[in-house]
Structures are given as C-alpha cells and as structure tokens.
Image (cartoon, helix red, strand yellow):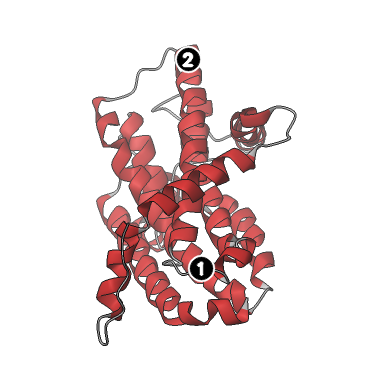
Amino acid sequence: MHEIIIEPGRAEANYWRDLWRFRELFGFLAWRDILVRYKQTAVGVAWAVLRPFLTMLVFVAIFSRVAGLTSTAMPYSILVLAGMLPWQFFATALSEAGSSLVSNSNLITKIYFPRIILPASSVIVALVDFAITLGLLAVLMLWHQFLPSWKIIFLPAFILLALVAALGPGLLITALNVKYRDFRYIIPFVVQFGLYISPVGFSSSVIAEKFGDTARMLYSLNPMVGVIDGFRWCLGDTTAFHTASFAISVVISLLLLWLGVRYFRRTEKTFADVI
C-alpha cells in the first residue's frame, strides 16, 4: 500500500511519480475500455478488420480505377492498406483520447489520480485494434505473394510515432472538451477530413512529382505523412521515405505532444469542478 504525500513546491515531481504508483489503475482502465468497445456487437472484434478492409476497397475503386493511380513498388491494394492501418490507428487513438475525460466524469469527481492516465489508457484500445488489423495486412500480402523488406524491424518505431502524433492533439482536445463541449463535434470532422489530406490512397511521392520537393515538405506538416511513409518504407517501398519530410513530421508530432501535455497539466486542476 502506497502513501501519497503532498509537499509544498513538489507538485510537479509528485505528479509524474504518481503515474507509476497508479500503474494498476492504468492497466484496469485500459482493459475495461478494450472489453467495452465491442460488447453487445453482432460481430465483435471483427469490426476492427471490417472497417479498414471496406475502406480499402472504396479507396482502391476510386483511386485506382477512377483516378488511375498505381504503384510500382507493391500491389496497389497493399499500398492503400499500408496507409489505412496507421491512419486508422491514429484516428481511433485520437477519438478515444479526445472523449476520455467526459466519458469518465464520475471517476474524476470522486477520487484523486493523475488525470492524464485516462487519455493514455484509452489509446490502448487503438493499439489492440491495430494489432488485429496487422493480420489483415499479412493475409493480403500472402494473397499477392508479396514479401516485406527486412526494414520491417523498424515498424514499432513508426507505430510509436503514430501514438505520439495522436496523443498530443488528443490531450489538447480532451482538455478543451471538458469546458467547451463543442469539441466533441470537432473530432469526427478532423478524422474525416484528415483521411483525405493524408497519403492513404496514394504515395506522398506523387506530391513531389507534381509540385516539387518544397510542396512535399509543406505537405509533411501533417504529422501522419511521416508515419504512413515510414510504414510503407518498412514494407519495401523505397520511394515512400523522404528524410526531410519525415523530420518535419517528427518535429510537428513532438511539438503537438509538448503543447498537449502542457495545456492538459495547466487545466487539469479545474476538471473536477467544471466537468
């Protein structure tokens, strides 16, 4: 059993220490969110596979047959799914983190714990979904008899980058959502709009081919560009990775995480009163 001692001038140090002390609560909340996500659904966890699969079919039909986009590095359906999976991971993590405080208002008003545990634990749901959908990608690669590159060993690094890219905006939105409930409408818009401005149905190298490297680097202000490009690079698409644009995506992701944590900590003490 642990004691929490509040000392003058030590609030910040104690707060981050409390994250470790409340690790069991973190695990419990993450497990609860996983169990509740597909409870009382007809097909259960199959939704984690159906959503990216059906979206992939739509993108293949639109971009391949209508727009005439193709891929020389890998089959086009694999290119799309390799972009869809990290995007789906980002979108789910952002959505779950963004609504985590409001959906746990009863818990916030009753006991003390580092509130950042709530959005952080909700992101685990997205990680579980992502792990399941990797199986879909493996099946599609077997279908096309496409073997990934040895660079696949770097895939966890890009998953971590996707997590960072989602957690920063998630912390900002969930903190703002406590005071301004309008933000619950912003998350679906960001997810829907972001899908079409991210290189899910096409390679970001197309931007460089048509508009030049400067346009590609500006395009990389979207942090998911570096994640998706890196994901495809791990599978064997050597044209996907661009060092400068990847560096921009990493910097933007880290900046958003810093802003998210800073704003969350600054407003955290008012959550119980406002919510």
The three-letter code of the residue at mark 2 reads: His
Counting from the top left corner in percent of width and height, residue 38 is at: 65, 37
Residue 14 higher or lower than 2, as above or below: below
Residue assigned mark 1: 111
Disc sitting over residue 38 in the figure: none
Residue assigned mark 2: 144
Residue visible at 69% across and 73% down?
182
Residue visible at 30% across and 57% down?
20
Pick the residue in front: 173 or 219: 173
Residue 189 higher or lower than 259, as above or below: above
Counting from the top left corner in percent of width and height, residue 136 is at: 52, 24
Residue 144 higher or lower than 115, as above or below: above
Residue visible at 68% across and 73% down?
181
Quadrant containing the C terminus in the rendered view: bottom right
Residue 147 higher or lower than 252, as above or below: above
Can residue 156 be seen? yes
Q: Secondary structure at mark 1?
A: loop
**Quarter occupied by residue 102:** bottom right
User: Which comes before the other along the chain, label 1 or label 2?
Assistant: 1
Q: CA distance from mark 1 to mark 2?
A: 53 Å
